[in-house]
Amino acid sequence: MSTSAIIMMLIAMLILWGGLAIAIWNISRYQGEEPQEVHRDL
């Protein structure tokens, strides 16, 4: 593989895995309570 392809692959992996890590961190730090009733408009 060429150097530019490797750099693009690393950037894409960083974006994907970084987004996953941030999502997991955001879910784990959420300390709110679940609502008792959920009203949804269908």
Image (cartoon, rainbow, N blue to C red):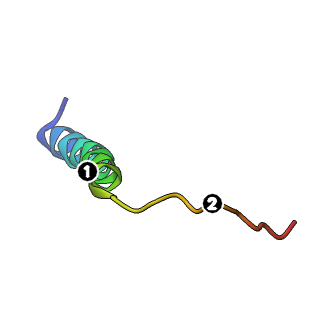
Q: Which residue is mark 1?
A: 25
Q: What residue lies at 24% left-to-right and 49% top-to-bottom?
A: 18
Quadrant including the N terminus: top left
Residue found at the very far right of the displayed protein: 42
Q: Which residue is mark 2?
A: 36
Q: Earlier in the sequence, mark 1 or mark 2?
A: 1
Q: How many marks?
A: 2
The foreground one among 17 and 38 is 38
Secondary structure at badge 1 equals helix
The foreground one among 9 and 17 is 17
Q: Position of residue 10 (x, y in %)?
A: 18, 42
Distance in Å between CA atoms under marks 1 and 2: 25 Å
Kindly indicate the quadrant of the structure image that contains residue 6.
Answer: top left
The foreground one among 35 and 4 is 35
Kindly indicate the quadrant of the structure image that contains residue 13.
Answer: top left
Residue found at the very far front of the displayed protein: 36
Q: Which one is in front in this view, the residue at disc 1 or the one at disc 2? A: 2
Res 13 label: none
- The three-letter code of the residue at mark 1 reads Trp
Q: What residue lies at 76% left-to-right and 68% top-to-bottom?
A: 39
- The three-letter code of the residue at mark 2 reads Gln
